[in-house]
Amino acid sequence: MSSHREAPSISKDPVADNTDTYAFVSPDNPDTVTLIMNYIPGESPAGGPNFYEFGEDVLYEFVIVGDADVVYQFRFQTQIKNPNTFLYNTGQITSLTSASWNRVQTYSVARVTSHHTEILGSDLLCPPVNIGPRSTPNYAALASAAVHTLSDGSKVFAGQRQDGFFVDLGSIFDLGDLRPFENLHLIPTPATTGHESLANLNIHTIALQVPKTRVTKNNFNPTTVTDPRSVIGMYARASRRKARIHSGPKDVESGPWVQVSRLGNPLINEVITPMAQKDFWNSVQPHLDSQFLKQVLHPELAGLLNVLYPGVFPNIAAYSKPRADLKAILMTGIPSGIITGFQNYTGPVAADLLRLNLAIPPTTSTPSPLGILGGDLAGFPNGRRVFDDAVTIELRAIAGVTIPLVDPSFIPDAAAALVTDGVSLGDRYISEFPYLGTPQSGFDIP
C-alpha cells in the first residue's frame, strides 16, 4: 500500500503510521492549497467498542520546506464524559455536542516558523466514527459540522474518512502479480480484473486548506510556472516523546519529540527501501536522503520485472544507467526544459518530498488519474491528488516510460505504458473539502 504498514516498527504503532500524504491546489478554491495526511491503516468499520481515534501522545505535522519553512502542528485530547459505561455512545449522536457521545476528541492547530508560533485553533471537535444508522443516523452532517475555520481563515478537518488509496494489495505482494497480466507471469494463471483491497476500509484524516501565500516566503502569490518561488516541497510526519515509562493506567512521557513516521511521495519506503533500512528511513529527515539514493537510481523492482514477466520487459532489464528520471521525479523535482510548461524543481539536494507548483491551476473538467503521465500537469508527481493512480504511475515510471525524458536513446518496452494493477478509486472521492469520502459504517459492511 502507499505507506500502510510499510516498516516493521511502525506497523506496531498504527496511530502514528502515516499512510498517505496529498498536496494539491484546491479545485473548488484555487487560491488555496490543500494538504492531507492519513493515519491508522486498515480501519475496519465495525471497530467497536473501542473505535479508532488519533493518538493523544503523537505530534502530527505538515512540514513545508524551502524558502518558507512552515510547520503546521496538530495535538489531540480525549474526554470521557461518563466513566461508568463501557459504551462509546449511549444513544444517538445527532450533533458534535450530543450528551450521548461518550468519548470525544478535540485538537489544536499551530503554525510554526523559525521566528514565531501562532495558535490557529484550539478545542476543535473531531466527528465521531461512523458507527451505523442508529448511532450516527446523519453522518454526513456530523462530518460537515467538523470542518472548522481557523483564525487565519484556513479550513481544517480531523476525523474518520474512507481510505482514498486504491491498490490490488493481494496480488502485488504475491510475487509481483498484476491480475490483468497474470497470464504473462512466471507462474501464470488466466488474466482477470484487479481486486481493490481497501474499498471497504476507513482511515483517520487530517486535512488543511490554506491560502497559497501562507506556505510561501513573504506572502508570495505564485502565478508564474517557471518561477522557483512557485514550488513548495512538503511531507507529513508523526513524532513521539523520546522517553516513555509504563506507570500504571497512564504512561509517563518526557523528552524531545522524535520522528517515528514520515511520508512525502507514495510507495518509496514501501517498495524501494530495503527491509533492513525501513525503520531507519522513518527516523531520518528528508534532507539526509542522499544515503538512500542508490535504491532510487537502481530500483530492485525494475530488475525483477523481466524475471517475473519473462520476455515482457527486456529493454528495462538491459538498462544499466542510473535512473536519472526517478531521481528527478522523487528526489529533486523535475527541472524546467524536461516537460513543456512544467517544473517543480527544489534544488539538487535529494529529499523525499511531494513537490507542488502552486502556479499550475487545478484541472476541473477532465482530470487524468495518471497525472503528468496522462498529460495532466496538475496531478502526481506535481503534488498528489486523492484520485491520482499512484500505483499505476509509479509502476509505469519504474518500468521505464519516463526514461526518454532524460535519455532519448532509450526505447521503453511496449508493456511499460500498459502496466497497471487494474483498480480505480471508484466513488470514494468528493468534490469539496476534505475531498475523501464519507467513511463506511460498521453496520453496512458485512
Image: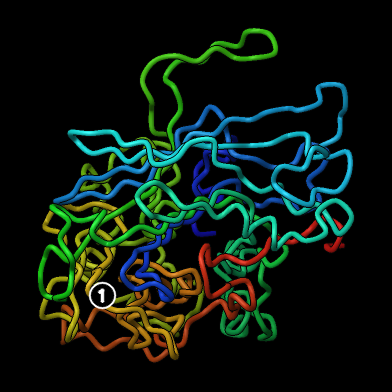
Residue 138 at x, y = what percent?
78, 61
- The image quadrant where one finds the C terminus is bottom right
Q: Which residue is mark 1?
A: 319
Colour basis: rainbow
Q: Residue at x 59, y 75 (%)?
A: 425
Measured as percent of width and height from the top left, residue 437 is found at: 62, 67
| Disc 1, SS | loop
Where 115 falls versus 318 (above or below)?
above
Q: How many marks?
A: 1
Which quadrant of the figure contains the N terminus? bottom right
Residue displayed at 43% across by 37% down? 279
Residue 115 seen in render: yes
Image coordinates for residue 298, horizontal then vertical, percent: 28, 61
Q: Residue at x 50, y 50 (%)?
A: 206
User: In terms of depth relative to the viewer, which is nearer, 110 or 183?
Assistant: 110
Q: Judge left or right: residue 139 versus residue 348.
A: right
Q: Position of residue 430 (x, y in %)?
A: 57, 73
Mark 1, residues whose alpha carbon is within 10 Å: few (<14), some, or many (≥20)? Answer: some
Q: Is residue 277 at least partly visible in the picture?
A: no
Give the residue displayed 73% in from the left and 64% down from the top: 200
Question: Is 329 placed left or right of 18 in the picture?
Answer: left
Q: Amino acid at mark 1?
A: Tyr
Q: Quadrant of residue 221?
A: bottom left
**In the figure, residue 406 lies in which quadrant?**
bottom left
View extreme (top): residue: 247
